[in-house]
């Protein structure tokens, strides 16, 4: 395959770019309804995806019920299959809305973000940005994934560096990179991510990375919703090697075209062996992830991907429905 991609890939990228251009010029209400309809259809035609999401979401809801946290709908879903199914269907709709937001990213101007995004933890945000210096922002596959970086760029006037997973579609990869770069984010590939992010931190810059899924392998088992899940060590290693402070940041949808964001500091243990400090950081990070997800469990669309090894069904097994 050439670096320019196949004709079909180039056509697909052109269609995505055209759909994004059109979406940015259409009324928001009908687009949201269309995304919701697409999510409902996705739920009906993807039984294997639904089966994994159901298993993972049930675990989250059982933890919420045990801890007495999160919305009533999430706690009830721990013991009521019908309630769990309603939450799962909502999760499909929420992920479809995420893809709509990706298409709308070019239209998300600073004024758009200021009007639509309410910050729930202003004191944490103010403290994090009180001084110009290095900062690690850790995100998760939750809610409006693009908005924390856009808010960060607008709030600080600085360009954050963030890694992006390479997809096997060069034209589409370039579209994602152009779109995210156009709104003030410097994108680097996963292969060079650690080197580039560490260099940015040592220059006193901002970096952002998503760390609730072990995409590259080699994650460290960390308690997450009561069970060990492999989490990438990248954020902990960056904090350890750079000395930069770190925060978990997330934005969830609170209504049609409305969002609520929160930020929480994650501390690196000051003493211990290198491994003890890394595992201590990851435990604190996972606890912050739990508090974020508890606010809207159906918006954690990582549930559609492998999280806990013990919940993964062998390929030869029959999928549950």
Image: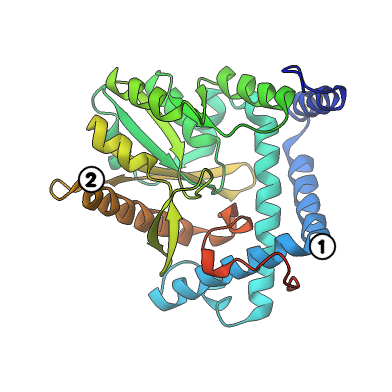
Task: Say if 28 sits above or below 142 in the image.
Answer: above
Q: Position of residue 97 (x, y in %)?
A: 68, 45
Viewer-closest of 34 and 179:
179
Give the side of residue 206 with respect to residue 209, left or right. Answer: left
Q: Is residue 192 visible?
A: yes
Q: Which mark is residue 226?
A: none
Q: Position of residue 104 (x, y in %)?
A: 68, 31
**Where does the N terminus fall, quadrant-wise?**
top right
Task: Say if 178 sits above or below 73 in the image.
Answer: above
Q: How many marks?
A: 2
Image point (49%, 75%), residue name: 62
Task: Tell me the residue that label 1 is attached to.
Answer: 44
Q: Is residue 245 visible?
A: no
Q: Which numbered mark, 2 or 1, is in the foreground of this view?
A: 2
Task: Tell me the residue that label 2 is attached to.
Answer: 268
Viewer-closest of 55 and 306:
306
Residue 74 appears in which quarter of the rendering?
A: bottom right
Give the side of residue 259 with respect to residue 153, left or right. Answer: right
**N-terminal-most mark, 2 or 1:** 1
């Amino acid at each position: 395959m050439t670096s320019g991609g196949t004709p079909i890939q180039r056509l697909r990228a052109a269609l995505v770019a055209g759909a994004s251009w059109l979406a940015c010029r259409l009324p928001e209400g009908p687009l949201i309804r269309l995304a919701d309809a697409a999510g409902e259809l996705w739920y009906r035609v993807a039984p294997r995806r639904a089966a994994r999401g159901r298993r993972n979401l049930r675990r989250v809801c059982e933890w919420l019920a045990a801890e007495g946290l999160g919305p009533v709908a999430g706690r009830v879903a721990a013991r009521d299959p019908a309630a769990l199914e309603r939450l799962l269907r909502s999760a499909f709709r929420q992920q479809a809305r995420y893809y709509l937001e990706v298409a709308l990213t070019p239209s998300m101007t600073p004024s758009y973000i200021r009007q639509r995004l309410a910050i729930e933890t202003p004191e944490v945000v103010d403290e994090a940005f009180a001084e110009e210096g290095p900062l690690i922002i850790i995100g998760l596959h939750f809610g409006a994934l693009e908005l924390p970086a856009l808010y960060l760029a607008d709030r600080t006037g600085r360009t954050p560096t963030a890694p992006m997973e390479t997809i096997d579609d060069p034209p589409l990869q370039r579209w994602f990179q152009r779109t995210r770069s156009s709104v003030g984010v410097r994108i680097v590939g996963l292969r060079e991510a650690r080197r580039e992010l560490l260099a940015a931190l040592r220059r006193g810059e901002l970096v952002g990375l998503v760390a609730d899924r072990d995409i590259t392998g080699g994650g460290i088992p960390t308690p997450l919703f009561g069970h060990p899940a492999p989490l990438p060590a990248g954020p902990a290693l960056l904090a350890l090697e750079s000395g930069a402070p770190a925060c978990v940041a997330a934005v969830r949808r609170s209504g049609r075209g409305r969002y609520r964001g929160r930020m929480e500091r994650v501390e690196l243990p000051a003493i211990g062996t290198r491994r003890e400090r890394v595992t201590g950081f990851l435990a604190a990070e996972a606890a912050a992830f739990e508090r974020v997800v508890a606010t809207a469990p159906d918006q954690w669309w990582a549930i559609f991907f492998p999280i806990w090894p013990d919940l993964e069904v062998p390929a030869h097994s029959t999928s549950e429905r």
